[in-house]
Image: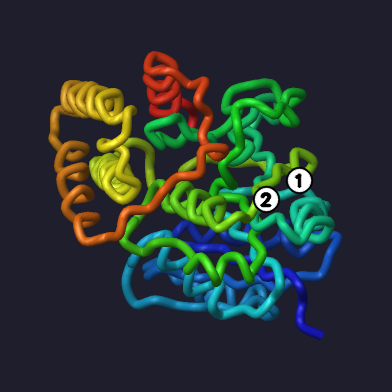
Amino acid sequence: MPSAIDVVVPTFNRCELTEACLEDLAAQTVAHQVIVSDDGSSDGTPDHVRAAFPDATVVESDRNSGFAAACNRGVAAGSGAFVVLLNNDVRPRTDFLERLVAPLERDEHVGSVAALLVRPDERRIDSVGLTADPTLAGFPRLAGRPVAEAASERPALVGPSGGAAAYRRFAWEKAGGLDEALFFYLEDLDLALRLRAADWTAAAAPDAVAIHLGSATAGARSSSMRFHSGFSRAYLLRRYGILRTRFGPRAAATEALVTLADLALSRDAAAGRGRFAGWRAAAALPRAGAPRDAVERRIGFLGSLRLRWEDVTRPR
């Protein structure tokens, strides 16, 4: 019988991370199908996975086409009722999958579920999904707080982080999956907003615990990362028409400050160039609306800047 759970692990080099992740998946307490979606690795990841994990399905791309595209290919290769996205630098506990999909099994209105990702010391939270301020700036929810606070209801949960997320396949397919125009960053926030706008609810599973080793695959604060981060931010600002709302002046001021700060710190214009490219890329898109209950309105201007800084400087 086909498994009800498809676990999609997007990969791009760092084969040793993928091997450790798949070993942890092999020890899970519920049946599942592993789908490794390789995004143009040059270190032999696909062949190694086939040899070491013959039960896994391997989907290959001949080029690096981005996180969203890799995830979409992996999801399309499966048929399970539930889809779990799991980064290869995440180490799940043995009951992780069982607890992560439980909210989907209990409530047919739940479209997505956020896991508890903890930092390597296992004392602090890396994220419990995503939260967003009124300008749709997204942040890892509860980042830096003690693990004991993982069940906190505030700030509001908009949806899961793509690094450790469960989705109802029907909801995923109706929403169209991840937007492949977003090469890296905020593609999970965009999908969360679209699912919420389609009346799917998001749940947190703080008992579904995994260790996030960090952004070992991409490398922290590279020029490429800052370009794609800027691209995604401007893309969403335009797609959701934020500058035309009453929060437009705040969004414009925030982006100007963040871009100038990045220029001063990094001494290049990657973040600014990314924002310009993202704004242009979203020009032809129909405007989408963000559901009011998906936004944490208690995150003010200064609070948003503080969260931006914490996100930039947090361990990765």
- To which residue does mark 1 refer? 208
Q: Upstream in the sequence, badge 2 or badge 1?
A: 2
Q: Position of residue 38 (x, y in %)?
A: 46, 70
Badge count: 2
**Quadrant of residue 28 within the rendered picture:** bottom right
Secondary structure of the residue carrying numbered label 1: strand
Quick check: 7 above or below 96? below
Side (left or right) of 13 relative to 294: left
The one of 252 and 36 positioned closer to us in this rendering: 252
Quick check: 275 above or below 309? below
Q: Residue at x 65, y 66 (%)?
A: 83
Looking at numbered disc 2 in the image, what kind of residue is underneath it? Val
Q: Residue at x 34, y 56 (%)?
A: 182
Please say if the residues under marks 2 and 1 sit with CB atoms less than 8 Å apart.
yes
Q: Residue at x 36, y 61 (%)?
A: 66
Asked if residue 17 can be seen in this view, the reply is: no
Q: Quadrant of the N terminus?
A: bottom right
Seen as rendered, the residue at the extreme top is 302
Q: Position of residue 89 (x, y in %)?
A: 56, 49
Classed neighbour count for the residue bearing mark 1: other residues with Cα under 10 Å, few (<14), some (14–19), many (≥20): many
Q: Position of residue 149 (x, y in %)?
A: 73, 24
Seen as rendered, the residue at the extreme bottom is 1
The one of 185 and 93 positioned closer to us in this rendering: 185
Looking at numbered disc 1 in the image, what kind of residue is underneath it? Ala
